[in-house]
Structures are given as structure tokens and as C-alpha cells.
Image (cartoon, helix red, strand yellow):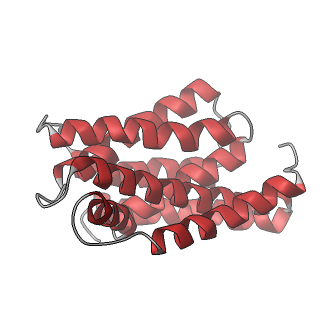
């Protein structure tokens, strides 16, 4: 894997904190602002969502360029499509199982340091993004408009990807690689717990 430049490291480590600070200043109440807050909180409050989205960032970091940038952009974009399907009431079978399975599969891909071609990794991430987005869309609170809500869950997702990518920086040392792969294994276990109804 090619080395991250110092500015890239600094940017990736600072991005989550900068976005969190921006989110803290968002106004609450009615309309777009409150919808944004609700959408932002939704994925962060679900452990099954959190681990899968962090895993996307970790796997992207392991794969390096161009997947490093493609996967964290692709997931939120496709997730919005899934969210739109959920808002429109389009049925998607086994959504919760798909979300849990995303943690299992993505966690194992990180744990095993699988180096898939970009198109394969994009396909895997895109399929799971539909399930995550659909869940967000079907759980849209009636009091909020879909646009602010969608913006909120996209920003939260991007932050979680960025956190995974930042953790992925540690793969440049042997100890760091072991820790990252161990994190992937832990994510797979969490996904399994949700998949089999233990969590």
C-alpha cells in the first residue's frame, strides 16, 4: 500500500472533528435543521450501522487508492437511493438481515485484508448501502422533511467512514495492521450478533 502524505494524514484525522464541530452548531427546532439533526443521530445510534460504516472506511484504507476515495463516496450516494426507496414505501426483503450481514462481510474483508478489485469492492459496498439507506428512509420521522433528514444521515455516514479511514492509517506498522485486522474481526462478531439475534 502506498504511503499517505503528511497533509493527507492530517486532513483525514481532522475531518471527523471538524464535521462534528459543524454539526454541533446546527440549529434545532422545525424544518430542515431539525430534520438534519434527526437524520444525523439515526445511524450513529445504531451499533449495527456504525460498525458497518466504520468497516467501509477501514477496508477503503486497506485497499488504498482509488478505492480509498471511491468507497467512502459511493456508500452515501447509493445509500440515498436506498433511502428514497424506503421513503416511497418500496419493499426490500430482509433489510435488517442485510444490515447485519454487512457488518459480518465487511468486517471479515478487513480482518482477512482481502484485496478485491475496485469494481468488486464497489459492488459489495453498494449492495450493502442500499439496505442501510432503506432502513433510514423507512424510519423517517413524520415531523421532518426528507431532505434535511437525508443530509443528516449522509453527513453522519461520511464521518463514520472518515473515522474508519483514520484508523486505517495505522496499517503502516505491523502492530497497526494487526490492530486494524483485529478491529475487522470484532466488527464481524458484532454483525454476527445482530444477524443471529443475540444483540
Judging depth in this view, the residue of 181 and 93 nearest the camera is 93
Q: Is residue 95 above or below residue 195?
A: above
The percent position of residue 187, horizontal first and vertical second, equals 49, 62
Q: In this view, does 149 lie above or below 182?
A: above
Specify whether 180 is left or right of 119: right
Please name the residue shown 70% across and 68% down the image: 179
Specify whether 122 is left or right of 39: right
| Total marks in image | 0
Please name the residue shown 85% across and 55% down the image: 7
The percent position of residue 80, horizontal first and vertical second, equals 35, 40
Q: Which residue lies furthest to the top in this view?
A: 119
The percent position of residue 155, horizontal first and vertical second, equals 46, 55
Could you tell me which quadrant the N terminus lies in?
top right
Please name the residue shown 75% across and 58% down the image: 11
The percent position of residue 196, horizontal first and vertical second, equals 27, 60
Quadrant housing residue 17: bottom right
Quadrant housing residue 167: bottom right
Judging depth in this view, the residue of 142 and 54 nearest the camera is 142
Q: Could you tell me if residue 89 is visible in this image?
A: yes
Please name the residue shown 27% across and 70% down the image: 198
Q: Could you tell me if residue 167 is visible in this image?
A: no
Could you tell me which quadrant the C terminus lies in?
bottom left
Amino acid at each position: 500500500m502506498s504511503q499517505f502524505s503528511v497533509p493527507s494524514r492530517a486532513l483525514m484525522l481532522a475531518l471527523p472533528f471538524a464535521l462534528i464541530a459543524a454539526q454541533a452548531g446546527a440549529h434545532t427546532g422545525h424544518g430542515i435543521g431539525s430534520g438534519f439533526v434527526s437524520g444525523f443521530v439515526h445511524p450513529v445510534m445504531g451499533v449495527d450501522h456504525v460498525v458497518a460504516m466504520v468497516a467501509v472506511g477501514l477496508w477503503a484504507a486497506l485497499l488504498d487508492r482509488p478505492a480509498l476515495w471511491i468507497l467512502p463516496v459511493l456508500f452515501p450516494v447509493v445509500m440515498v437511493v436506498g433511502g428514497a426507496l424506503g421513503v416511497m414505501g418500496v419493499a426490500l426483503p430482509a433489510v435488517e438481515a442485510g444490515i447485519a450481514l454487512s457488518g459480518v462481510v465487511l468486517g471479515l474483508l478487513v480482518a482477512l485484508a482481502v484485496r478485491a478489485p475496485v469494481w468488486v469492492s464497489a459492488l459489495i459496498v453498494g449492495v450493502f448501502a442500499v439496505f442501510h439507506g432503506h432502513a433510514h428512509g423507512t424510519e423517517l420521522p413524520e415531523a421532518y422533511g426528507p431532505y434535511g433528514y437525508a443530509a443528516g444521515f449522509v453527513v453522519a455516514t461520511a464521518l463514520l467512514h472518515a473515522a474508519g479511514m483514520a484508523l486505517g492509517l495505522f496499517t503502516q506498522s505491523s502492530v497497526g495492521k494487526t490492530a486494524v485486522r483485529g478491529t475487522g474481526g470484532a466488527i464481524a462478531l458484532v454483525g454476527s450478533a445482530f444477524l443471529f439475534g443475540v444483540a
